[in-house]
């Protein structure tokens, strides 16, 4: 791993890779896929371009009959410019594309695993785990598209970072937002809280003081809701994710603890042998590791105790304050050396601005305090050098210091403790919890140079304190082991409410199938729950495994999907930033197959879709505009009558209009609903499939619109219609009191449906924006998707992950039509859910001058992020055309 290469290659990478490996070794887990961005550029290692890479074999590799796919894998998904590394703050416009690519991979895997170990059924992921804000956003959308539970780990939180940066007073909020895209990140974190079943934190402090800053999380409300749920009392549609502290582990395999006993210090070494144990084994003395020589060449007396800091040269790691504390305190300089390991660098001019600024200040301070001979700051180190660096510091009876302004957890502190090195650490963040568990050093205010110098001096000078801290750290370090982490992790997941796609059928014979299928599902679910709750129960017994697989096989047949090759490619190299994780366990092989026989299922036969999602409304009436209607007529008639299109695509209308409004519009345009394969109505809250009745002579006598009931079930997650309706009424009342008692929103009961609360907006200029409304609802524990439509004249409140863009992903999962084979036709603006439709793997056709108004002004209040943080301004999948050229363009593309 290239840790410390830049601000994106830090502790999270190590955490996620080690977690993936450790999870894959758990007997309950069959496979872990670590999804990250693919980069094919000569500027980065070639392995970043590899689509798959094996991280480790899983615990099932011994069994011949459990397929060849178990283990932990990195899977790289293309998104954004393929040949360019982009720092994490610039990835936001490519989230939708990543989601679609990830969906393709997951759907492939459900089939591949089904064939390998599920006898042709589909095997869905057990959970989707997002790490960091961007992957949280992605995991929310994937979890919604697949109806699979989501887990979240924040690692480092945007609201906290914003607070700290504002406190430093060096940048305005506007500048911070421009540099760090912090508002977009915070919204991703809020969305992650909306969707996650479970949030894993490294410390208690992270729950109370960091997640507590979010609209969507409130420690007290969480407790109240949990207590109500336990007593079986209604929560009125309010939800809070469960938060659980599970500190990360560390890989002890390379840890060698030097025996620095006071009586004899003869260089004999002891080694921690297993990840679960702190037992020590003597190993023979050996020559100095090369990194020791590399450090020693800086120092006049390398035998003095080493004060060690190991952190990326990120301003928030506060290394310059440490340098000042050291430089100012003569006694400390006389007693000890300072070693700074600050990532790897070739040329400071080529480092990112923030990191380069830190390095320049460090060099200036070294010169100012004339620290030559007393400080080491090597340019390079390898991963294998890191344990040796800690060992060197411990051997000299040194101290590890982490003076970060805030440290969310602090992996380096447990690494230091595992090597018998006492610590001085910031009192802001995770170190407080680490100190409580290990009691291996002193906590300090990172802004206070004197306090830092005092603490370092105490530990370096007081031998008995040093010995006690070292001993304490070693004694309890086993608390931070990955197997321990995984056991708690899996048992917490087992307590979450598990969800998975379960398509239902409509005809009576299929209902019978469904009954028996549900019985099997219940059996297997019970079985899997027992498996996971008891973390020690293993499926290492092949008979258990066989029993489980058999019971899954009774769930049904393949959905007739095209054959897709398993992803293999077992290169053993490592890569950069990890985006999200998918965990699959054998117990998840409970999910049924897509028997899929909805009465009307034309989409199943389609391989390509044209989705008309133009929000063209007449500004005077807010009804469909004539420009839009004539484009619609043009598209339908030409596509349906063009015999040179070899395989007719499916046609879909996707709109804020209700089903009856769409039908009325089609009638007035002389079009029949039967021309369309599906209608996405009321902004994605309902899906209908038109089907024709035939009389006894085979003549069509009527057209039915079949509601997709599976879609209804699919989007029902965290939907609390009544609770929301009442809260909306209360909010509306208080807004009215501030606006001369004029109601801004009037409930539009005739346009509501069971998954859509509809309102007429009386004055769109003073109506709250989407982000303002969402904030008020989140603060009350209400999770939903709020959107304005029809030139801001209407407001729809929908289930959290119901939207027009998510419904396309549902079609992919449900009917096997890859999003990449969809053409989405849009205007230049539209309803407030418009920007989510702009990017993804589909082709986007933007028609000029077809939408006159749009609702985008109601999307975000000033000071928030912009469209450029949601979708790229241009991409090769997007084209802007004149209205009269749209049809020809599409026909050409379809031939
Ligand atoms: O030059 C360096 C700098 C760091 N590291 C390693 O990288 C990791 C750094 O982790 P940490 O110091 O914890 O910090 P961050 O990179 O900032 O990681 C974030 O994510 C971690 C995992 O959740 C949390 O422990 C941190 O608090 C959080 O800030 C450690 O394993 C270090 O050994 C190196 O190998 N070389
Ligand atoms: O400074 P930020 O934006 O909070 O980012 C910190 C994140 O980036 C990394 O440093 C890179 O791995 C992570 O360790 C951490 O989760």
Image (tube, rainbow, N blue to C red):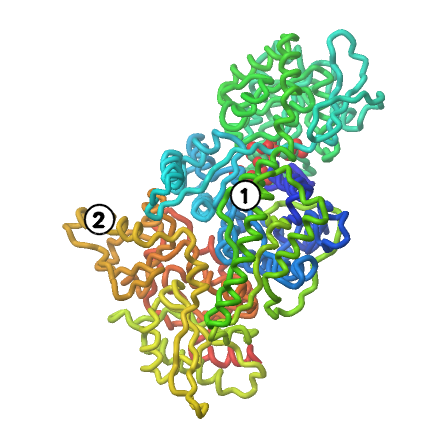
Asked if disc 1 is less than 8 Å from ligand 1, the answer is no
Q: Which residue is mark 2?
A: 735
Q: Position of residue 62 (x, y in %)?
A: 77, 47
Q: Position of residue 646 (x, y in %)?
A: 58, 83
Check if mark 2's residue and mark 1's residue have beta carbons within 8 Å.
no
Circle 2 crowding by C-alpha within 10 Å: few under 14, some 14–19, many from 20? some
Q: Position of residue 659 (x, y in %)?
A: 35, 71
Would residue 357 be seen by someone viewing this image from the given angle? no
**Label 2 element class:** helix
The residue located at (44%, 78%) in the rendering is: 676
Front residue of 572 and 551: 551
Q: With respect to residue 886, does 216 lie above or below?
A: above
Between disc 2 and disc 1, whose residue precedes? 1
Front residue of 386 and 812: 812
* 408 sits left or right of 24 in the view: left
Ligand 1 visible in quadrant: top right
* Foreground disc of the pair 2, 1: 1
Would residue 258 be seen by someone viewing this image from the given angle? yes
Tell me the quarter of the picture where residue 820 sits. Answer: bottom right
The residue located at (25%, 48%) in the rendering is: 731
* 324 sits left or right of 220 in the view: right
Q: Which residue is mark 1?
A: 494
What is the spatial separation of the Cα atoms under label 2 and label 1, in whole angstroms?
43 Å
* 147 sits left or right of 29 in the view: left
């Amino acid at each position: 791993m290239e840790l410390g290469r830049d601000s994106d290659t830090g502790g999270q990478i190590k955490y996620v890779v080690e977690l993936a490996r450790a999870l894959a070794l758990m007997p309950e887990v069959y496979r872990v896929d670590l999804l990250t961005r693919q980069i094919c550029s000569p500027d980065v290692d070639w392995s970043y371009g590899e689509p798959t890479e094996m991280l480790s074999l899983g615990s099932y590799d011994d069994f011949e009959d459990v397929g060849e796919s178990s283990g932990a894998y990195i899977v790289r998904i293309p998104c954004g410019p393929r040949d360019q590394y982009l720092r994490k703050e610039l990835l936001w416009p490519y989230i939708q594309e990543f989601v679609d690519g990830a969906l393709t991979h997951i759907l492939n895997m459900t089939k591949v695993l089904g064939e390998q170990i599920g006898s042709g059924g589909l095997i869905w992921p057990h959970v989707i785990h997002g790490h960091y804000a961007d992957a949280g956003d992605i995991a929310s959308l994937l979890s919604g598209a697949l109806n699979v539970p989501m887990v979240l780990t924040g690692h480092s939180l945007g609201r906290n970072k914003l607070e700290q940066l504002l406190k430093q007073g060096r940048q305005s909020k506007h500048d911070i937002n421009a540099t760090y895209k912090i508002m977009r990140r915070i919204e991703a974190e809020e969305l992650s809280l909306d969707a996650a079943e479970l949030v894993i934190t490294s410390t208690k402090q992270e729950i109370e003081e960091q997640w507590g800053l979010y609209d969507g999380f409130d420690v007290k409300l969480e407790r109240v809701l949990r207590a109500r749920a336990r007593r079986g009392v209604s929560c009125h549609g309010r939800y809070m994710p469960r938060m659980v502290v599970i500190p990360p582990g560390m890989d002890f395999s390379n840890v060698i603890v030097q025996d620095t006993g006071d009586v004899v210090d003869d260089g004999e070494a002891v080694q921690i042998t297993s990840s679960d144990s702190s037992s020590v084994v003597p190993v023979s003395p050996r020559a100095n590791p090369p990194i020791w020589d590399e450090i020693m060449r800086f120092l006049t007396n390398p035998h003095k105790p080493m004060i060690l800091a190991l952190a990326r040269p990120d301003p928030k790691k506060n290394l310059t304050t440490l340098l000042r504390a050291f430089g100012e305190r003569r006694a400390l300089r006389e007693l000890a050396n300072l070693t700074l390991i600050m990532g790897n660098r070739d040329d400071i001019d080529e480092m990112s601005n923030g990191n380069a600024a830190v390095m320049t200040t460090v060099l200036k301070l070294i010169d100012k305090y004339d620290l030559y001979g007393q400080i080491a700051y090597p340019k390079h180190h390898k991963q294998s050098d890191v344990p040796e660096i800690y060992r060197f510091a411990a051997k000299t009876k040194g101290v590890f210091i982490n003076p970060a302004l805030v440290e969310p957890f602090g992996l380096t502190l447990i690494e230091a403790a595992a090597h018998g090195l006492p610590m001085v650490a910031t009192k802001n963040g995770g170190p407080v919890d680490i100190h409580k568990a290990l009691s291996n050093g002193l906590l300090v205010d990172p802004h206070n140079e004197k306090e830092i110098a005092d603490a370092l001096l105490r530990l370096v000078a007081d031998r008995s304190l040093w010995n006690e801290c070292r001993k304490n750290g070693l004694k309890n370090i086993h608390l931070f082991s990955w197997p321990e982490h995984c056991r708690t992790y899996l048992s917490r997941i087992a307590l979450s409410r598990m969800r998975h796609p379960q398509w239902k059928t409509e005809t009576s014979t299929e209902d019978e199938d469904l009954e028996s299928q549900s019985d099997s599902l219940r059996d297997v679910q019970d079985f899997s729950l027992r498996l996971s709750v008891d973390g020690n129960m293993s499926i290492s017994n092949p008979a258990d495994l066989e029993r489980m697989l058999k019971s899954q096989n009774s769930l049904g047949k393949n959905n007739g999907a095209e054959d897709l090759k398993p992803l293999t490619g077992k290169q053993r190299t490592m890569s950069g930033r990890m985006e999200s994780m998918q965990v699959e366990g054998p117990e998840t092989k409970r999910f049924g197959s897509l028997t899929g026989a909805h009465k009307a299922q034309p989409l199943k036969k389609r391989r390509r879709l044209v989705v008309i999602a133009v929000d063209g409304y007449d500004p005077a009436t807010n009804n469909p505009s004539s420009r839009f209607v004539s484009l619609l007529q043009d598209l339908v008639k030409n596509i349906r009558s063009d015999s040179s299109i070899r395989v007719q695509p499916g046609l879909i209308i996707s709109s804020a209009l209700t089903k009856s409004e769409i039908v009325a519009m089609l009638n007035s345009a002389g079009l029949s609903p039967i021309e369309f394969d599906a209608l996405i109505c009321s902004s994605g809250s309902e899906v209908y499939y038109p089907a024709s009745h035939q009389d006894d002579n085979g003549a069509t006598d009527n057209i039915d619109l079949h509601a997709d009931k599976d879609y209804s079930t699919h989007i029902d997650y965290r939907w609390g219609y009544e609770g929301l309706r009442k809260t909306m009424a209360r909010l509306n009342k208080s807004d009215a009191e501030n606006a001369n008692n004029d109601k801004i929103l009037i409930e539009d009961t005739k346009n509501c449906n069971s998954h859509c609360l509809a309102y007429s907006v009386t004055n769109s200029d003073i109506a709250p924006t989407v982000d303002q409304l969402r904030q008020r609802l989140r603060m009350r524990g209400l999770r939903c998707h709020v959107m304005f439509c029809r030139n801001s004249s209407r407001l729809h409140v929908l289930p959290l992950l119901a939207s027009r863009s998510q419904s396309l992903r549902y079609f992919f999962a449900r009917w096997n039509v890859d999003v990449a084979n969809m053409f989405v036709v849009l205007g230049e603006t539209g309803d407030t859910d418009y920007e989510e439709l702009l990017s993804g793997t589909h082709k986007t056709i933007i028609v000029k001058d077809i939408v006159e108004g749009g609702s985008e002004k109601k999307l975000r209040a000033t000071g928030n992020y912009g469209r450029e943080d949601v979708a790229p301004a241009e991409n090769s999948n997007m084209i802007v055309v004149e209205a009269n050229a749209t049809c020809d363009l599409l026909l050409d593309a379809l031939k």
